[in-house]
Amino acid sequence: MAVPSTSERNDGRGDTAAIAVNSLEFSYPSEPPLLSDFTLRLEPGSRCLLIGANGAGKTTILRILAGKHMVGGTDVVQILSRPAFHDTSLVCDGTLSYLGGSWSKTIGGAGDIPLQGDFSAEHMIFGVNGIDPERRDRLIDLLDIDLEWRMHKVSDGQRRRVQICMGLLRPYKVLLLDEITVDLDVVARMDLLQFFVEECEQRGCAILYATHIFDGLDTWATHVAYVAFGRLEKGLKVTELEGLHQPGGADNLLEMVEPWLRKERELRPKKAEEYKKKQEEKKRLEKSSPSKAAQDRFPSTPASRQGESLWGAGRHMAFYR
Ligand SMILES: Nc1ncnc2c1ncn2[C@@H]1O[C@H](COP(=O)(O)OP(=O)(O)OP(=O)(O)O)[C@@H](O)[C@H]1O
């Protein structure tokens, strides 16, 4: 089956991007800025690896894309031209699916599994309504799930399979994956990766996959997005990666990415020093002109909401910059 045309994918909406992030700024409350002027664009049909050091902000980016944090206006983070946070139907109708990496991070996600209570795999999977039975059976088969598994007794990998199955039941158009394959055995991982390729090629889905494990991903990924120091340092098609599979260059993605991360590690003390100096300058400014400093810190936020942090049902609305 051919990839749907642009107009079919986007219901006539202007922008063709599956994921569009425009100059995103984000900080956790009372923490230094994590993302600053972060921009990313991914077209339907893309399989993009989200790469970065520990703590670079990959999970945060995926959570923001999944609509779990309100950031800026409705045009800052969009999924298929719809605002990720405000358009709750994106998740409800299954257009957008987010599969988190650790159990603690997935509370509220598509494949949530209670850690207590005696539930079977069948109970979990068949409890999701309105699913195409053919798709469901294919996933159960693909992930080799025994419907009689008791979820409080299964291994991490078995629990992960059920979680993944639940997250993929609806035919999503955008899939956000936060290192979900760590617990899977080799066969399950390779079959799942192949399934994702088919989903992208046949249905024009876009996948953004945060991972540190590049095994089997050299030919899988179409794009890489490397995040460092709060920005998209590199956002490229794999075929455009200079030196990859070229004489004298890197033989694979791991070899390609390792020097990026080493260089980043070297630069980190310098960046920290620059940030410290900026903060000292800001403090100096605050002392000399408090109202001007407040204006600089929250330029677009009404004074009544400056520094405010609101918590909604599982979704964090941060007004900090
Ligand atoms: N709820 C929170 N409150 C404050 N800081 C947070 C919160 N969640 C994450 N952070 C911080 O934000 C930074 C980015 O975290 P995040 O989990 O997004 O990184 P990551 O790139 O996914 O890392 P890893 O590769 O280790 O999974 C880290 O320094 C982390 O400590």
Image: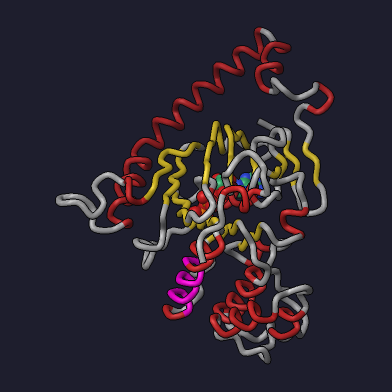
Quick one: 173 or 112, which is closer to the camera?
173
Quarter of the figure with residue 221: bottom left
Q: Write the residue at 34% across / 39% down.
A: 266
Q: Quadrant of the C terminus?
A: top right
Residue 313: where, in percent of width, then height?
A: 82, 53
Q: Say whether residue 98 is magenta.
A: no
- Looking at the image, the residue that sits furthest to the left is 247
Examine the rendered structure and indicate whether residue 4 appears above or below residue 64.
Answer: below
Left or right, 161 with respect to 170, comes to left
Examine the rendered structure and indicate whether residue 262 appears above or below residue 89.
Answer: above
Q: Write the residue at 47% across / 39% down.
A: 232
Quick one: 41 or 49, which is closer to the camera?
41
Residue 1: where, in percent of width, then height?
A: 51, 67
Q: Write the residue at 66% across / 63% down.
A: 106
Q: Write the residue at 56% across / 37% down.
A: 35
Quarter of the figure with residue 180: bottom right
Left or right, 164 with respect to 300, comes to left
In terms of secondary structure, what is the magenta stretch mainly?
Answer: helix
Left or right, 26 with respect to 247, comes to right
Residue 146: where, in percent of width, then height?
A: 62, 89
- Looking at the image, the residue that sits furthest to the right is 304
The part of the chain drawn in magenta is 188-197
Q: Say whether residue 192 is magenta.
A: yes
- Looking at the image, the residue that sits furthest to the bottom is 148
Residue 166: where, in percent of width, then height?
A: 67, 73
